């Protein structure tokens, strides 16, 4: 085995590779850019080499520096991870020419398979079904129109150099073609410095199923089951699982053997993935082959019990595969969610900043592959994927529930992530049923928000968590005043029954808490439902809360400000307002009395920060129209007009902090 290797990557995948090396007693050399100098992968490696300024093209993409570092530090091999130089033919070549081992397939194989047109031709030769289309570079728009007519709309324009879904455009009819062709060419040129585009039939609502293969230098090729990666946003995978509900034993064998045939035809070695699209008739078609370890490889590891990095290392050193096809068994189910620094509420714009708090869940049947920790800085320079949460279960449902809990417990502050969005997917009834297709997110989500109402019980759990936190905070204040009121307090016997009214946007929950703050057992009534709740000790009510509700552990993330509590749970995020019955009653009367006076004024319903003002003086607005957007406890909410009218004066500016009840704008009477 190698004594020392260099890892030409960063983040979670570098950390992941280092872990296997440690277990196998292989020393590791990390590389890093300026901004990564204190990052996790650097600290975990035995040695580390500085590459240059933060941008990738002056650091992680500088081939010569990486190869020199490997030589200087007496490495025998280079592991490229995924992304960066992992599918770069020249890099693989130069590594080999320098006398080092490239941990991956031969350079020329990367070259052929990296080109979608060439790899489709190869697949065709190997007898692999390919998506019907015209497997040649399109000369111009006229050519595209002719070819599209032949194939039949809808068609998909694809860059030959493709990756990450960039440059792809669906075209439904001839009149969409001109615009789509230009846009695709433009994007392709920008992303890949090349504008070779081809056309294939667009398959409607397919599933994305891929086969993990492993090949050694003696010609042995095996497949390690499938992964379903149909949950995609803009052709980028969000949730992956293994096995797939759509694949039975027979189909698995057929797809697996097809993938192996392609790998043999290509002269492939190392780990690779053959991606297929499975249409609604159960027919599958080759999409592309990825010549590297994939982001979602952990789900395969959890169901096969294999370490793919270990297998890569063994094959690279020349060993034969330690197992044959018949030794491969799939056990249970595994699901992965990609955790990315992006804001679903702002059209998934990347989010950057310093991670101020990070609690990564751990436990049985949970795996968290992460490249970050508290203190890490998330920059604009690299991919925004921070970590991956992976779960295992005997059944799909068990794995799903475990992953939901991992995401509920994934507490990260400082940058906005897609954790709640991913969790909402896992909690969607269609996901639970397994009705998956690549159109899933567009079909069921609107701007990152589920199109249907969340389950009532989930909301009641959240109302319970919010009320307990509120109650606890109120009592802590009372406790702190105790010395002053000790005598009075002693005389007042605690009744141990507390009532609250909770408003969660349009839903009202009537809460009755039965219990004692010195004990951790509560009986809680929410409207007509009753729950037995075990709470932590009062000191532990923080920004995350673990409650045992009717015997099962549930985890919540919370933010609070006065009567307002923001809660995140099972993909639902909501602001709750909590009142005592008296406060609530007053609140009911108050607006009625003051309505006449307040009609011309738009008040802020909550404390927060003004993000955007959507109206200007003189605008005619209608009742219910959003006029001001306020960010409060990580959520953006629109404040809508209480009347039809004309805006008279705007009283706030974007960026300004407001209290609940502050005037936002006035209307002409
Ligand atoms: P990339 O190199 O960007 O990963 P792929 O060819 O693997 O490109 O395609 C990415 C995704 O785009 C697929 O997972 C699938 O969702 C969609 N896709 C690709 N080709 C087709 C097609 N012919 N019909 C329908 N969807 C497709
Ligand atoms: P247990 O071992 O009791 O099952 P866990 O392993 O689930 O508890 O939790 C371990 C730690 O996580 C505890 O210190 C607990 O306080 C903390 N924790 C509680 N609630 C949350 C939450 N919502 N998110 C993340 N961590 C939490
Ligand atoms: Mg792909």
Image (cartoon, rainbow, N blue to C red):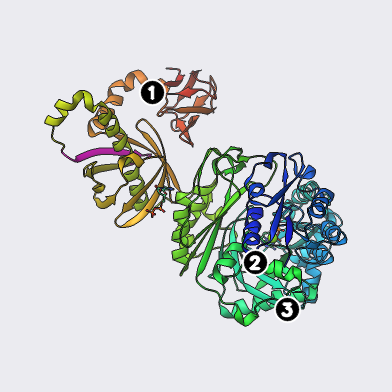
Mark 3: few, some, or many residues within 10 Å (few <14, many ≥20)? some
Residue 661, disc: 1
Where's residue 156, x and y in %?
72, 59
Does 339 sit above or below residue 351? below
Helix, strand or loop at label 1? It is loop
Residue displayed at 53% across by 20% down: 618
Mark 1: few, some, or many residues within 10 Å (few <14, many ≥20)? few
Mark 2: few, some, or many residues within 10 Å (few <14, many ≥20)? many
Does 465 sit above or below residue 235? above
Helix, strand or loop at label 3? It is loop
> Which numbered disc, 1 or 2, marks the residue closer to the eye?
2
Q: CA distance from mark 1 to mark 3?
A: 72 Å
Relative depth, front residue between 383 and 639: 383
Please give the range of residues in magenta.
495-507
**Quadrant in which the N terminus appears:** bottom right
Ranked by sequence position, the earlier of labels 1 and 3 is 3
Which residue is denoted by mark 3 in the rendering? 220
Helix, strand or loop at label 2? It is helix
**Quadrant in which the C terminus appears:** top left
Which residue is denoted by mark 2 in the rendering? 308
């Amino acid at each position: 085995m190698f004594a020392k290797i260099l890892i030409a990557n960063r983040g979670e995948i570098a950390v992941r590779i280092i872990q296997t090396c440690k277990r196998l007693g292989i020393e590791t050399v990390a590389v890093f850019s300026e901004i990564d100098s204190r990052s996790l992968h650097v600290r975990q490696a035995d040695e580390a080499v500085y590459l240059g300024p933060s941008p990738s093209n002056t650091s992680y993409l500088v081939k010569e520096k990486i190869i020199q570092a490997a030589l200087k530090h007496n490495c025998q091999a280079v592991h490229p991870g995924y992304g960066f130089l992992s599918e770069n033919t020249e890099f693989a070549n130069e590594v080999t020419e320098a006398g080092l081992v490239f941990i991956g397939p031969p350079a020329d194989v990367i070259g052929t398979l990296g080109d979608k047109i060439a790899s489709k031709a190869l697949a065709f030769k190997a007898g692999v079904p390919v998506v019907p289309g015209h497997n040649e570079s399109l000369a111009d728009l006229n050519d595209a129109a002719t070819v599209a007519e032949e194939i039949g709309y809808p068609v998909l324009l694809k860059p030959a150099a493709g990756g990450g879904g960039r440059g792809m455009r669906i075209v439904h009819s001839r009149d969409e073609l001109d615009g789509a062709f230009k846009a695709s060419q433009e994007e392709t040129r920008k992303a890949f410095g090349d504008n070779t585009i081809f056309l294939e039939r667009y398959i409607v609502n397919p599933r994305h199923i891929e086969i993990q293969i492993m090949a050694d230098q003696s010609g042995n090729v095996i497949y390690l089951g499938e992964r379903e990666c149909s949950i995609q946003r803009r052709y980028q995978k969000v949730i992956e699982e293994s096995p797939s509900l759509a694949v039975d034993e027979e189909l698995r064998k057929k797809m697996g053997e097809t993938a192996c045939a392609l790998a043999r035809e290509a002269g492939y070695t190392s780990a690779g993935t053959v991606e297929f699209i499975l249409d609604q008739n159960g027919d599958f078609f080759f999409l592309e082959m990825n010549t590297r370890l994939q982001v979602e490889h952990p789900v395969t590891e959890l169901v096969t019990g294999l370490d793919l990095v270990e297998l890569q290392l063994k094959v690279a050193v020349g060993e034969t595969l330690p197992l044959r096809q018949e030794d491969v068994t799939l056990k249970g189910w595994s699901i992965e969610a990609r955790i990315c620094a992006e804001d679903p509420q702002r059209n998934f714009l990347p989010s950057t900043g310093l991670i101020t708090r990070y609690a990564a869940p751990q436990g049985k049947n949970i795996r968290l592959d992460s490249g970050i920790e508290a203190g890490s800085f998330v920059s604009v320079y690299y991919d925004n994927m921070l970590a991956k949460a992976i779960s295992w279960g005997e059944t799909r449902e068990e794995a799903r529930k475990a992953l939901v809990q991992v995401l509920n417990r994934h507490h990260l502050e400082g940058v906005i992530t897609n954790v709640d969005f991913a969790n909402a997917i896992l909690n969607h009834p269609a996901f639970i049923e397994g009705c998956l297709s690549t159109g899933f997110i567009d079909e069921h989500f609107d701007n990152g928000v589920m199109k249907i109402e969340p389950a009532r019980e989930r909301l009641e759990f959240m109302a319970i968590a919010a009320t307990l936190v509120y109650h606890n905070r109120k009592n802590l204040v009372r406790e702190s005043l105790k010395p002053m009121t000790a005598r009075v307090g002693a005389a007042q016997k605690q009744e141990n029954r507390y009532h609250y009214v909770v408003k969660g946007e349009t839903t009202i929950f009537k809460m009755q808490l039965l219990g004692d703050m010195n004990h951790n057992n509560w009986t809680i009534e929410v409207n007509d439902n009753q729950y037995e709740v075990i709470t932590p000790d009062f000191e532990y009510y923080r920004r995350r809360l673990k409650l045992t509700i009717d015997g099962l552990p549930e985890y919540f993330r919370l933010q609070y400000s006065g009567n307002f509590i923001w809660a995140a749970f099972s993909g639902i995020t909501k602001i709750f307002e909590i009142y005592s019955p008296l406060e609530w009653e007053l609140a009911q009367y108050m607006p009625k009395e003051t309505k006449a006076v307040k009609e011309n004024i738009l008040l802020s319903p909550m404390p927060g920060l003004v993000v955007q003002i959507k109206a200007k003086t003189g605008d005619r607005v209608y009742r219910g129209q959003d006029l001001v957007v306020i960010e409060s406890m990580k959520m953006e909410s629109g404040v809508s007009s209480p009347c039809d009218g004309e805006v008279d004066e705007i009283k706030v500016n974007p960026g300004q902090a407001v209290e609940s009840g502050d005037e936002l704008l006035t209307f002409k009477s």
